[in-house]
Image (cartoon, rainbow, N blue to C red):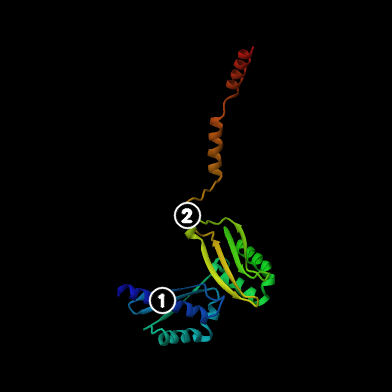
C-alpha cells in the first residue's frame, strides 16, 4: 500500500509540473520545482520571462493558484518566480526555442536554426554544447541530425553536471524531437587541469634539471668514437 501511495504522489507531482508548463506555454518555463512546507506547497517556476509568467498585476499567478487548488486539490499553494539570468546556458529554454523556430519557419531551415542556437550558446561562454534533431528533416523519411561544438562529457560522474533537456516541435511533415545538452562554464569539474604561469615555470625548471649538461654529452661522444675505432 505504501508503494502505491508513493507512485500516486509522484504521478500527481508530475501532472502538476506538466500542467504548469502547458498553461504558461512553450518557451517561457525552464524548470518547475515543488517544495513541501508545513504551511503548504511551494511551487518554484524558473523562467527568463518573469513578466509574461506573472501577468498584469499578478493575474496569471492568481489564476494558476486557483486552478491548482481546484484541479489538483492542493491545500495552500504558493508560487515563486526564479529568474534565469542567462537563458543561453539553460538547456530547456534553448530546446524550446529550437522547437518554436521549427514550428514557425518549418523543418526546411532546421540547419540554420540549429547552428544559430549552437553559436548563441557558445558565445555565452559554454564549454560545450550538443543539439540533436530527429524526425522528417528534410526528406519524407525520419533521420537524426547532430550539431555539436566544444567539450562535452558523455560518461562518468562528470556527465551528471551536463544540463540536458528535451522538446517537441509539431511541424506539417510530422513531429520533430529536439535534444539539447550544455556544459556550463560555472560548474566545477574535478578532472579539469589549469596551466598558469607558475605551473609553466615549474615545468620548465624540471625540464632543465632533466637535461644532460654539454660537457657530459661531449665525453659520451668521444667514448663512442674510441669504441668504434
Q: Which residue is drawn at 51% across and 51% down?
A: 192
Residue at 58 percent across and 61 percent down: it is 129
**Of marks 2 and 1, the one in the foreground:** 1
Can residue 78 be seen from the camera position used here? yes
| Relative height, residue 228 to residue 3 (above, below) | above
Q: Residues within 10 Å of mark 1 (few under 14, many from 20)?
A: few
Q: Which residue lies furthest to the front in this view?
A: 141
Question: Residue 212 vs residue 172: left or right?
Answer: left
User: Residue 149 in the image: x percent, y percent?
Assistant: 61, 58
Residue sitting farthest toward the top: 229
Q: In which quarter of the image is residue 102?
A: bottom right
Q: Can residue 94 be seen in this view?
A: no
Residues marked 2 and 1 touching at CB (< 8 Å)? no
Query: What numbered label is drawn on residue 52?
Result: none
The residue carrying mark 2 is 156
SS label for mark 2: loop
At label 2, counting other C-alpha atoms closer than 10 Å, the crowd grade (few under 14, some 14-19, many 20 or more) is few
The quarter of the image holding the C terminus is top right
Q: Quadrant of the N terminus?
A: bottom left
Compared with 185, 70 (above or below) is below
* Residue to which mark 1 is pinned: 11
Percent across and percent down for residue 78 are: 41, 80
Q: Camera-side residue: 171 or 98?
A: 171
Q: Give the mark nearer the N terminus: 2 vs 1.
A: 1
Please, what secondary structure does the residue beneath circle 1 have? helix
Q: Residue at x 33, y 72 (%)?
A: 3
Q: Residue at x 55, y 76 (%)?
A: 28
Residue 33: percent from the left, percent from the top?
44, 73
Quadrant assignment, res 96: bottom right
Q: Distance between the residues labelled 2 and 1?
A: 30 Å
Amino acid at each position: 500500500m505504501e508503494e502505491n501511495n508513493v507512485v500516486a504522489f509522484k504521478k500527481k507531482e508530475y501532472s502538476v509540473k506538466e500542467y504548469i508548463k502547458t498553461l504558461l506555454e512553450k518557451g517561457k518555463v525552464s524548470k518547475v520545482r515543488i517544495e513541501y512546507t508545513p504551511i503548504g506547497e511551494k511551487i518554484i517556476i524558473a523562467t527568463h520571462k518573469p513578466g509574461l509568467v506573472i501577468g498584469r498585476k499578478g493575474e496569471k499567478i492568481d489564476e494558476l493558484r486557483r486552478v491548482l487548488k481546484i484541479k489538483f486539490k492542493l491545500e495552500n499553494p504558493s508560487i515563486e518566480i526564479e529568474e534565469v539570468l542567462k537563458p543561453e546556458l539553460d538547456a530547456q529554454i534553448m530546446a524550446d526555442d529550437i522547437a518554436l523556430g521549427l514550428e514557425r519557419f518549418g523543418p526546411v531551415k532546421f540547419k540554420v536554426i540549429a547552428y544559430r542556437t549552437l553559436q548563441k550558446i557558445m558565445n555565452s561562454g559554454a564549454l560545450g554544447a550538443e543539439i540533436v534533431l530527429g524526425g522528417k528533416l528534410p526528406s519524407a523519411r525520419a533521420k537524426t541530425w547532430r550539431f555539436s561544438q566544444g567539450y562535452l562529457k558523455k560518461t562518468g560522474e562528470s556527465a551528471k553536471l551536463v544540463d540536458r533537456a528535451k522538446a517537441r516541435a509539431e511541424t506539417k511533415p510530422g513531429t520533430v524531437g529536439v535534444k539539447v545538452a550544455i556544459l556550463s562554464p560555472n560548474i566545477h569539474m574535478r578532472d579539469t587541469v589549469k596551466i598558469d604561469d607558475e605551473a609553466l615555470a615549474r615545468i620548465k625548471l624540471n625540464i632543465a634539471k632533466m637535461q644532460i649538461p654539454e660537457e657530459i654529452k661531449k665525453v659520451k661522444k668521444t667514448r663512442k668514437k674510441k669504441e668504434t675505432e
